[in-house]
Image: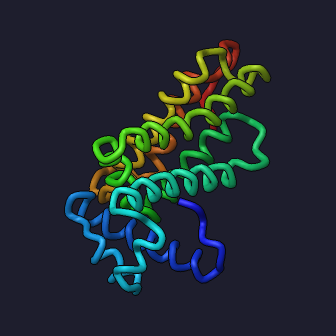
Amino acid sequence: MSEPTTARGRRTRQQLLRAAEVVFGKRGFEGASISEITRRAGVAQGTFYIYFPDKKSVYVELVEELGRRLRNHLAEAVEGLEDRLDVERAGLEAFFRFTRQHRSLYRLVRQAEFVDDRAFRSYYRSMAAPYAAGLAEAMDAEQIRRMDPEALAYCLMGIADFLGMRWALWESDGETSGEEAIQEAMDLIYAGLAPAESTGAHP
């Protein structure tokens, strides 16, 4: 749907999206209702249909918007960094922060596979494309060893995904802290990405 033309309309639409993030995160897609979303947003139920035709449309828009916000958050976190290993660490730390702030992210994205497969795939492809481009640039600069950039991007996204689930989303009930988990991951990533002539552990 097109973006509202007035500031009030944009605010109302954002209220609905923020309410939907909470309700879908709590209830899941099937358990959520438009009435609960509008109650939480503080608007009349009929107002919902000015901005979204149905429950699925607000869900898909929410997944897309969270993806955009995450990508922007990561881009800001790594801005100005030139060394690829520094970029990887800063990006992983930023992903942890975003996950802690948006605890419904995992449930929303994973359910999207069954609600709208196009949105589900788009979420990951939109993340992987710029990631792979950055990795390719680092390979050209001989900062990291040459591999398939897209395959590498998905490998690194998989590491972040599961670490974020365990140490940013779940309770910290183990002996290892989130910071220690990030360091463990960076030791592994450094060993896998560093050019063949490099030795030692990345700080």
Relative to 185, is 72 on the left or the right? Answer: right
The residue positioned 60% from the left and 83% from the top of the image is 8
Horizontal placement of 120 versus 202: left or right? left
Taking depth in this image into account, of 130 and 61 the one nearest to the observer is: 61
Q: How many marks?
A: 0
Q: Position of residue 5 (x, y in %)?
A: 65, 73
Give the residue displayed 53% in from the left and 32% down from the top: 187
* Left-right relation of 31 to 174: left
Q: What is the x, y in percent for residue 181?
A: 44, 44
Q: Relative to 188, does residue 80 appear above or below in the rendering?
A: below
Name the residue nearer the viewer: 25 or 99: 25
From this viewpoint, is residue 53 visible? yes
- Return the residue found at the far left: 31
Residue 144's image quarter?
top right
Quarter of the rendering containing residue 36 = bottom left
Q: Is residue 152 above or below residue 184?
A: above
Relative image position of residue 188 (x, y in whole percent): 50, 29
- Residue 91: image location, x then y, percent: 59, 46
Locate the C terminus and report the quarter of the image it occupies.
top right
| Residue at left offset 48%, top offset 53% | 96
Residue 79 shown left or right of residue 168 in the figure:
right
| Closer to the camera in the image, 123 or 16 | 16
- Residue lying at 74% horizontally and 49% vertically, measured from the top left: 79
Q: Is residue 184 above or below residue 50?
A: above
Nearest the eye: 77 or 41: 41
